Image: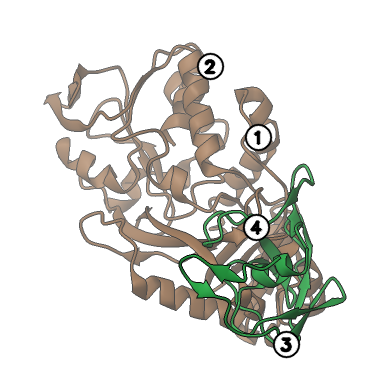
Amino acid sequence: MGCSLAYYLARKKIRVILVEKSHVGAEASGRNAGGVRQQGRNPAELPLAMESVKMWPSLSKELGYDIDYRRVGNLYVARNKKQLEDFKKRVEHEREAGLDVRMVTPAEACRLMPSLVKEKIYGGTYCPTDGVANPIRITFAFAQAAKALGAKLYTHTEVVGIELSGNEIKFVNTTKGKMGGEVVVNATGPWASVIGKMVGLHIPIQPKRAQMMITQQLPQNACAPFIVTPGDYGYWTQTLHGNVLLGHTSRPVEQYDIGVTFEAISFQTQKTLQFLPSFKKVAIIRCYSGLTEWTPDGIPIISFVKEIKGFIVDAGYSGHGFCIGPISGKLVSEMIIDGRPSLSLKAFEYSRFQK
Amino acid sequence: MRIKVHPVLGPLKGKATIEIEVDGRRISAIPGEMISSALIAAGIKVFRTTHKKGEPRGYFCGIGQCTDCMMTVDNIPSVRTCITPVSKGMKIKTQYGHGKWEV
């Protein structure tokens, strides 16, 4: 979010300082599965996701760096009748909102994803305009493009405190000295609550850990669309180089721990084999974890905060912020520059948690 | 080609008593040996071709690290033949790129 915002601000000739605790894309932005997904979202996020998907195809060219964006489609699979009923209601709403999404029969789902077992599934929903991109590449691309436009990028720089004078921010204390500006954006993902405390705000964001596994390179039809199935099963997607990523749904975690656990590996492989038995023959070559950041209602906070002048919270994407990264950066830049984002961000007000 | 007497391991033990199939052709193998050994003994040097340029690859590191010797074994793509033992009637195919995903 920070890199995307820095780029859209720098493009409008705004002076930007981007502070990264570690390197660019070290956290969730570089550790997720890269799903550029519109379907299956909270209705409040859908307009943002749809607008963002319009931006994704041209980003490689615009940023001057290949981000491996591919429109591979997204397939939600129902493993029981109840899930299928839920899908039907959701698709109805999404179609009304103008999304190109449709129900598919078990046979159609198997044609899209040959590893599915027809007898075990009840059907699904397919969104052909959904896709994937390389999360490390896009984050890097935004940061580099922002830098080329004049943004100052401080990596391995930690924010250690914020000094206030009344309700105004005097400066931000970092491990590389004092910095400041007219507007300070808290786009620190799971750490947003920690930064919030520095200005006396309670930002209800909690970290959860999601563990991923990577298989050996496989033929491109091993997992052609991005696959999701509800419940605790996780998601599957294939990289440009053929490795399949097996994603694990998020679990609460203490102390921002991003280690990997054997329990998660075991759980995830068992679920995968129940759902996609042909993966039995596949070798896992690596696994890693990342932190997702959750708000109580599962949608982000993207707003100014009335208590502190010029302070924006841009966090809490609750495990599905990747797709809306580009539009979010653009909208927050509009919010900063002329106070009027081109899409409504009303549903994402910080004040909704203050009632 | 087989090493009949190895300076460290000594003389070759076991006899080629089983058969495996490579691209439809039957070759003999010693029970317990790795697929790649049987292939080299039968004079087969090209195990796969690369994904991007289609260049030939074969036995290289011999310890399961380099993945140059990957082939499709019993419909499983990308099996490292240098660390996978032979078994009777095994069907091995030269792999082109990442091979085929058969469910």
The reply to whether dot 2 and dot 4 touch (C-beta < 8 Å) is no
The answer to whether residue A213 of the structure is visible from this angle is no
10 Å neighbourhood of mark 3: few (<14), some, or many (≥20)? some
Q: Residue A157 at x, y = what percent?
A: 25, 28
Give SS at disc 2. helix
Q: Nearer the viewer, residue A326 or B89?
A: B89
Q: Mark 4 points at which residue?
A: B59
C-alpha span from label 1 to label 2:
15 Å
Q: Name the residue under label 1.
A: A55
Q: In which quarter of the image is residue B91?
A: bottom right
Tell me the colour chain B is drawn in.
green
Type of residue at label 2? Answer: Arg
- Left or right: residue A284 versus residue A49 is left
Q: Mark 2 points at which residue?
A: A11
Q: Mark 3 points at which residue?
A: B18
Chain at numbered mark 2 = A
Give SS at disc 4. loop
Q: Is residue A337 above or below residue A196?
A: above
